[in-house]
Amino acid sequence: MRRLVLAIAMLAVGGMAAEAQDTPAPAGARVYFINLKDGDTVSSPFLVQFGLAGMGIAPANHDGGDAHRNTGHHHLLIDVPALSGEALRSGIPADDNHRHFGGGQTEVTVTLPPGRHTLQLVLGDWMHVPHSRPVVSERITVVVR
């Protein structure tokens, strides 16, 4: 039931996002993985820590906007293609492969099956839309043993 409610909410947010104005990101803003690098081998579950420079973290505000300029919140993309084109101009979906941290969280413990997995961080605005100058991390691969 919780996933159904979240899915309906994200559809509503996605619809609003098409009408939302671009949210700028300051030059030099970047998001990155603090404790992981491309090619790391990890044991599941594992901790993923999100880093951000040049901007601040603010929770998503579904009541009409973000009161803080130059802020956003994290999204962790797992095993999905790198965002490009229209995907960078619309709301990020909410599912097991697109994890939202609208409460302002800066880390999460992730459980994944053994094998190779890709991870990427994307900063989103108050409507879960990447900024008009997207703030995205390098897409890394980790091996879960």
Image (tube, rainbow, N blue to C red):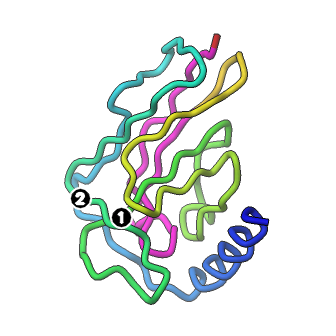
- The quadrant of the picture occupied by the C terminus is top right
Residue 142 drawn above or below residue 98? above
Residue drawn at x 62%, y 39% is 78
| Label 1 secondary element | strand
Task: Count residues near mark 1 (Cα–Cα under 10 Å), then give few for <14, some for 14-19, many for 20+.
Answer: many
Left or right side of 143 for 27: left
Left or right side of 3 for 92: left
Front residue (pair 142, 47): 47
Q: Residue 57: x and y, percent?
A: 30, 60
Q: Amino acid at mark 1?
A: Gly
Q: How many marks?
A: 2
Q: Residue 70: x and y, percent?
A: 25, 68
Q: Quadrant of residue 107?
A: top left
Q: Which mark is residue 92?
A: none
Q: CA distance from mark 1 to mark 2?
A: 8 Å
Residue drawn at x 47%, y 40% is 108
Which residue is under mark 2? 55
Residue 55 colored magenta? no
Sequence order check: which comes first, mark 1 or mark 2?
2
Q: Residue 131: x and y, percent?
A: 41, 66
Residue 47 drawn above or below residue 40? below
Residue 123 drawn above or below residue 18? above
Q: Amino acid at mark 2?
A: Met
Q: Residue furthest front?
A: 1
CB within 8 Å, label 1 to label 2: yes
Residue 132 colored magenta? yes
Residue drawn at x 28%, y 82% is 67
Q: Residue 44: x and y, percent?
A: 60, 20
Which residue is under mark 1? 72
What's the magenta region? 119-144
Task: Count residues near mark 2 (Cα–Cα under 10 Å), then give few for <14, some for 14-19, many for 20+.
Answer: some
